[in-house]
Amino acid sequence: DTGVSQDPRHKITKRGQNVTFRCDPISEHNRLYWYRQTLGQGPEFLTYFQNEAQLEKSRLLSDRFSAERPKGSFSTLEIQRTEQGDSAMYLCASVSQGAYNSPLHFGNGTRLTVT
Amino acid sequence: SQKIEQNSEALNIQEGKTATLTCNYTNYSPAYLQWYRQDPGRGPVFLLLIRENEKEKRKERLKVTFDTTLKQSLFHITASQPADSATYLCALLGGSSNTGKLIFGQGTTLQVKP
């Protein structure tokens, strides 16, 4: 168990640019979640994958956000035309097939700063 | 709407004392509640899960209670140590339960002074 890996750890970008983050879940985990966390707040749910299928998206996720999980392994989260309000920590979590109360395994996030 | 509230003010206590953190929820009937620890710049780490039919759960110096009548969970750290300083998050299963999506409170920051 090498843990959930996220890349990059930090990203600074200018407003209007596109950014893409990557998440490598624990290898046998088929469920994957993306969350966003701003300072002083808890993680907010963005989207959920079961294998390669994106089964739920938060209403917080504007059209500028897109996520993929090709082949049900790693996942990418892309933000187009970034805005300063997108500055946050983006967290990925995974969990194996099983009871839906199973604890999530989080990566250490990608911190995005939009200038 | 569904809401989870934790003490937003930081909790400062002396080493050796018991820390008690509160998680209140409204418009939920959760079957489970989870607690996570988060250190600065890191992702949350799972600590404990308690089911609705369990009044209390313990793990080493940690104790969680779950009162579905009061819609509240209490998280206790006994004999606290400076290494316990972190933000603690409670989380409930949100929305349709077949996604396993967790909804988090805003977290309470605990500072244990030596």
Image: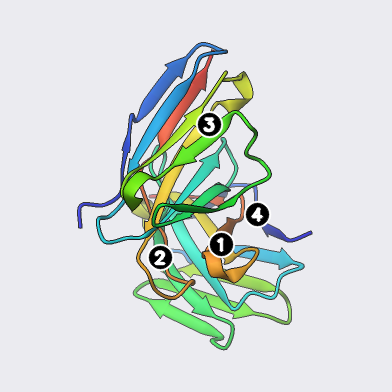
Spatial separation of the CA atoms under disc 1 and disc 2: 11 Å
Q: Is residue A38 left or right of residue B84?
A: right
Chain on which label 2 sits: B
Whole-angstrom CA distance, mark 4 to mark 3, is 22 Å
Q: Quadrant of residue B37?
A: bottom left
- Towards the viewer: B20 or B26: B26
What residue is pinned by disc 4?
A: B7
Closest to the camera, between mark 2 and mark 4, is 2
The residue carrying mark 3 is A88
Q: Residues within 10 Å of mark 1 (few under 14, many from 20)?
A: many
Report the residue marked by disc 1. B91
Where in the figure is residue B80, as x and y percent of width and height? 40, 61
Chain to which mark 1 belongs: B
Report the Cα–Cα distance between label 1 and label 4. Answer: 14 Å
- The secondary structure type at the circle numbered 3 is strand
**Residue A60: where, in percent of width, then height?**
66, 41
Mark 2 — residue? B47
State if disc 2 and disc 3 touch (CB < 8 Å).
no
Q: Secondary structure at mark 1?
A: strand
How far is disc 3 from disc 2 in space, using C-alphas? 24 Å
Q: Amino acid at mark 3?
A: Ala
Between the residue at mark 2 and the residue at mark 4, the CA separation in whole angstroms equals 19 Å
Indicate which disc, 1 or 2, sits on the residue closer to the N terminus: 2
For residue B113, above or below residue A80: below
